[in-house]
Image: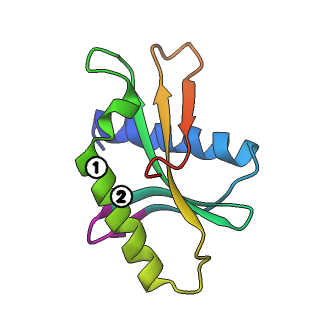
Amino acid sequence: MGRNQTLGRWGEEVAARYLTARGYRILERNLRTPYGEIDLLARQGGQLVFVEVKTRTSRAFGYPEEAVTPRKQAHLLSAAQHYLQMHPEQPADWRVDVVAVYRPAADLPPEITHFENILA
């Protein structure tokens, strides 16, 4: 696994723990669809939450959340809609969130920022 993949998986684990500590239930990880991958699928109460995780160790290329471009948002929307079509048993109430994880140094705790309902 390459450095970026390793960092990405680490960020997804950090995000999953962060969400779980806040009452979310993680249902699936790295869910593949024809429109791209959904990093985390979670449930918060009766709402289904599709979570995109962005992890960075430097801000040289901007904040992690800045990588969720309009094109990426369109892919996330298509991936979520595809999943819902394939799983009609899931609740009709859903949203897409972004969890940004910034890790400036291995010996420092990560900074986590959670953006809810980014497509609203």
In the image, 120 versus 62, the foreground residue is: 120
Q: Is 79 displayed left or right of 88 in the figure?
A: left
Give percent across and percent down for residue 43.
65, 62
Residue bearing the label numbered 1 = 72
Q: Which residues are magenta?
A: 31-36
Residue placed at 41% from the left, 33% from the top? 55
Residue bearing the label numbered 2 = 76
Main SS, magenta region, reads strand
Q: Is 37 displayed left or right of 30 in the figure?
A: left
* Label 2 CA crowd tier, 10 Å (few <14, some 14–19, many 20+): many
Q: Is residue 43 above or below residue 116?
A: below
Q: Secondary structure at mark 2?
A: helix
| Quadrant of the snapshot with the N terminus | top left
Q: Is 74 displayed left or right of 116 in the figure?
A: left
Give percent across and percent down for residue 42.
60, 60
The amino acid pointed to by label 1 is Lys
Q: Residue furthest front?
A: 120
